[in-house]
Image (spheres, rainbow, N blue to C red):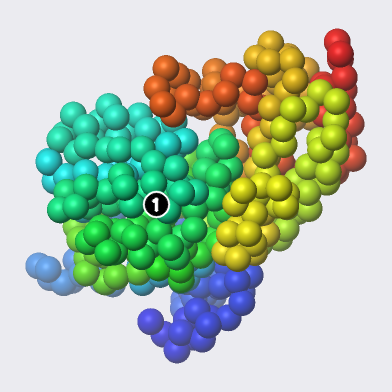
């Protein structure tokens, strides 16, 4: 790492987001990493690699720049970019687990994560047990000594926004000889850095807040241990679920504005929570920033702010929840989250349909909002119309 990059890694978040992982091109002075649309690289003699590049599955300079900034933002030793968040998750599991091993997962995990463990990893011989991430004792009880290799948490969880105490759960995992993995997608590196609290690895769907513009699918993995980094490097190349240079470029472009976007997401979310609280059509507002949220104290300790995700339950049951989702105009009915545009969805029928009928099933009257960066008054008026129609 150059002296300039060493200095940048000690700088503020926004400075790292813009400058970490890449220095202006020495030939042209280009301040943005070029898109290296190449599959292979000329070698200076057999095995004489320029900068370590030989084939773009193994490494590509555009991807290298993205991986560098991701590591800097999460304050980890090494970052890895993948074709999707689930590709990052699967690569980490294949790196750290073998048939016969065991993983603890959230009892309200993201549906795609649950599907990965239940339908893919379990068929490979890796078993899992769900536990409430907000209950340290429950996580400890779910660990199977000698078998559990990973304690896998989301905080906040998707979609119930439960909060896990990262520092306490890291201690529990390490006492059992397991690694703590934190899905940091909902918080983003701007609001929370799990590696600084004792986590061993952080995963992201960079499709969400990191990319931030709903125009590219991607994933990331950042680790704090160089030995684990070496193992992941091997598996990333061996499995090959990596992003192309165009995807890496788009994600890196989004990273640069992460800080300012997250502040606006949080500003808008706080206004919407205030509006929803006490509304006659709302049975419950779920947001870590509310003092009555059971994880509020922990979230206040480990998060900079409380994020742009809100869930709420309506008084009229599933029928009303579906109707609200269908009536909004500024909030777009769609899956995913973390983009500049606001999204609304019904988790039970959409993102979490894969857990229907299991102990991870979410309430049928639940609605999830991904609050964008639009003019907040327009968002408030849109929700008022959707909630009041037919009331």
Picture mark count = 1
Describe residue 351's horizontal placement relative to residue 244 as left or right: right
> Residue at position x 72%, y 36% from top?
285
Which image quarter holds the C terminus? top right
Where is residue 227? Give x, y as percent: 22, 69
Local SS, label 1: helix
Instruction: Specify whether residue 159 is in view.
Output: yes
Residue 60 visible somewhere in the drawing: no
Q: Residue furthest left?
A: 46
Left or right of 47 in this view: 90: right
Crowdedness of circle 1 by 10 Å Cα count: few (<14), some, many (20+)?
few
**Image quadrant assignment for residue 279:** top right
In the image, 255: left or right of 198? right
Residue shown at 42% from the left, 17% from the top? 357
- 389 and 38: which one is in front? 389
At x 72%, y 58%, the residue is 263
Say if 390 sits above or below 166 in the image.
Answer: above
Q: Which residue is mark 1?
A: 137
Question: How far across and how far down the image is residue 277, in percent?
Answer: 81, 38
Residue drawn at the location 24% of the way across and 59% of the way down:
176
């Amino acid at each position: 790492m150059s002296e300039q990059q060493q200095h940048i890694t000690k700088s503020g978040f926004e400075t790292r987001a813009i400058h970490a992982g890449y220095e202006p091109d020495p030939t042209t002075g280009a301040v943005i990493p070029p898109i290296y649309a190449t599959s292979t690289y000329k070698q200076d003699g057999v095995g004489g690699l320029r900068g370590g590049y030989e084939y773009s599955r193994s490494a590509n300079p555009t991807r290298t720049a993205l991986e560098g900034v991701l590591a800097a933002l999460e304050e980890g030793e090494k970052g890895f970019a993948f074709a999707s968040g689930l590709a990052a998750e699967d690569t980490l599991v294949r790196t750290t687990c073998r048939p016969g091993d065991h993983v603890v997962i959230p009892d309200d995990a993201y549906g795609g994560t649950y599907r990965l463990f239940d339908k893919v990893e379990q068929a490979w011989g890796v078993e899992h047990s769900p536990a409430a991430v907000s209950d340290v004792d429950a996580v400890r009880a779910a660990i199977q000594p000698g078998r559990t290799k990973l304690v896998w948490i989301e905080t906040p969880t998707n979609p119930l926004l439960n909060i896990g105490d990262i520092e306490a759960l890291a201690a529990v995992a390490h006492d059992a000889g397991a690694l703590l993995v934190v899905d940091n997608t909902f918080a983003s590196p701007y609001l929370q850095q799990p590696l600084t609290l004792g986590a061993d690895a952080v995963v992201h769907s960079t499709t969400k807040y990191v990319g931030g513009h709903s125009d590219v699918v991607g994933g990331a993995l950042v680790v704090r241990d160089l030995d684990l980094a070496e193992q992941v490097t091997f598996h990333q190349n061996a499995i090959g679920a990596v992003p192309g240079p165009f995807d890496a470029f788009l994600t890196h472009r989004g990273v640069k504005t992460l800080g300012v976007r997250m502040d606006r997401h949080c500003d808008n979310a706080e206004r919407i929570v205030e509006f929803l609280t006490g509304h006659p059509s709302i049975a419950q507002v779920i947001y870590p920033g509310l003092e009555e949220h059971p994880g509020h104290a922990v979230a206040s300790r480990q998060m900079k702010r409380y994020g742009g995700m809100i869930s709420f339950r309506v008084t009229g049951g599933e029928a009303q929840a579906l109707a609200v989702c269908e009536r909004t105009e500024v909030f777009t009915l769609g899956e995913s989250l973390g983009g500049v545009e606001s999204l609304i969805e019904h988790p039970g029928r959409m993102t979490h349909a894969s857990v229907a009928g299991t102990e991870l099933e979410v309430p049928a009257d639940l609605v999830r909002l991904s609050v964008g960066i639009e003019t907040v008054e327009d968002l408030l008026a849109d929700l008022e119309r959707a909630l009041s129609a037919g009331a």
